[in-house]
Amino acid sequence: MPKCLVILSGGQDSTTCLAIASQQFDEVHAVTFEYGQRHAIELESADAVARTLSVTSHEVIKLGAILKGTSPLVSKYPVSTYTTPDEVPDGVAATFVPSRNALFLTIASNRAIALECSTIFTGVSQTDYSGYPDCRRDFIDSLEETLSLANWGTIGHLKIETPLMYLSKAESVLLAKAVLGDRFEEVMELTHTCYQGVKGGCGKCAACLLRDQGFKEANVVDPIWKFRG
Amino acid sequence: MPKCLVILSGGQDSTTCLAIASQQFDEVHAVTFEYGQRHAIELESADAVARTLSVTSHEVIKLGAILKGTSPLVSKYPVSTYTTPDEVPDGVAATFVPSRNALFLTIASNRAIALECSTIFTGVSQTDYSGYPDCRRDFIDSLEETLSLANWGTIGHLKIETPLMYLSKAESVLLAKAVLGDRFEEVMELTHTCYQGVKGGCGKCAACLLRDQGFKEANVVDPIWKFRG
């Protein structure tokens, strides 16, 4: 029976991945990481999404503040705000946390083995925004090989699938709509994206600007807008 | 100024690596992982070794019991005992914890970046015992590449050095003696290897049998023997 483990942050992309996995696999498990991130609202979103999509199991793995860095997501540095997506600087994002996705996927591989899942889904994408080196497929390919070597002799090849890797944000919105159908609004209104932890989104951080642009280009109303002040 | 981060478990091999790093680098930092392992004595050994070898910093990273598996090191399954090293079964060790070294090295890479260390030392070895797939150089090579991709654009290439990789246990003992010189006994008596958590070693688990064999072949008296009942 094919089983899948989904890394669920409670954001738009990981929620879309969970919806896709629910269609493709007989059994879907979710893991969420509590790593001292600035906003508990992310964890509340993940919990609500996991319940609504009726996963077989959902584990919140409590790591505490084990990752160091200058990213506002794990430190007291302020989150930058902008007026348009074009203003967000090129290069590595100020919000990047060194080795974060490698850490999450490595722990996920341990859980996938324990749960007998042969596939891990993660919502990373390299299309619209290249500020996160650990959201690129070349990193994922390398990690997939590394984790298979790390556990050589105990499991077959552990696949890390990235269904959104080559989609624009607008395409991801349309894919979520296609997969969720009638449940699109019910599920998407539970998600959280804003780096500032504002319910409904601040509309000014890089994450909100990118989400807003994606929904706009897709010509879809974002259900979280109802919460925006 | 070249700096090194050493993964220090408090065992014989990581202690030898720390001694080597102390000779080769201007600044040496150590990290130890508390991951719900069976015996606190490991952490006490790591602390004592780090103090005795005067590292610049020593951090115990508290992960709690985040790794699942059937290994006696992280579960309630009993540790197997044997009479000779030849009795230890071939294949993946019963004590293997899926993705453990990948996890430790990934977190270490985050710390290496924060501390501006370009090199990580780890005491893994593939020579005498092949029961741990994540102690092989092909895994380390792959992970080194993965972590560089994960942090691409933020750091140069992060090197993971494994000074003991191709040494037998006996050769490791002789290397530690050469590097530590007059301090060999003072430092080595602080180390802990036994899977059963017995100070001085139970002499019957796979880890003790391998350590004992190494010292015997090297014709060196193991300083921990003074504690053995």
Image (spheres, coloured by chain):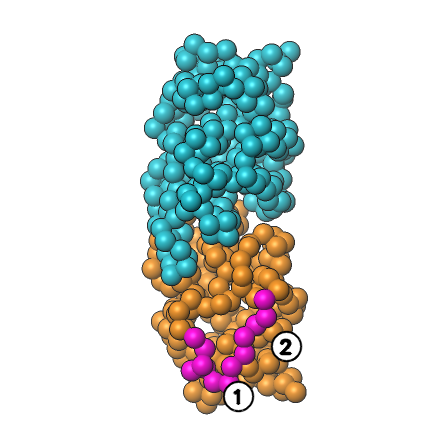
Chain colours: A orange, B cyan
Chain bearing mark 1: A
User: Callout 2 environment at 10 Å: few (<14), some (14 to 19), or many (20+)?
Assistant: some
Marks 2 and 1 belong to one chain: yes
**Amino acid identity at mark 2:** Val
Q: Could you say which is closer to the camera, residue A194 or residue B18? A: B18
Q: Is residue B216 left or right of residue B41?
A: left
Main secondary structure found in the magenta portion: loop
* Chain on which label 2 sits: A
Question: Is residue A16 rendered magenta in the image?
Answer: no
Q: Give the number of callouts.
A: 2
Numbered range of the magenta stretch: A77-89
- Residue A82 forms part of the magenta stretch: yes
In front: label 2 or label 1 = 2
The structure residue drawn at horizontal position 37% and vertical position 44%, both measured from the top left corner, is B159
Residue in the picture at 46% in, 18% down: B181
- Secondary element under disc 1, as helix, strand or loop, is loop
Question: In this view of the protein, which residue sits in the foreground, A227 or A28?
Answer: A227
Query: Which residue is label 2 attached to?
Result: A198
Q: Which residue is mark 1?
A: A221
Q: For the point 37% across and 56% down, which residue is it?
A: B149
Residue B8 versus residue B148 in the image, above or below: above
Q: In the shown orientation, is residue B145 left or right of residue B40?
A: left
Q: Position of residue B12 (x, y in %)?
A: 50, 25
Quadrant where the image shows the C terminus of chain A: bottom right
Residue B226 appears in the picture as rendered: yes
The residue type indicated by label 1 comes to Val
Give the Cα separation between the discs numbered 2 and 1: 18 Å
Tag on residue B201? none
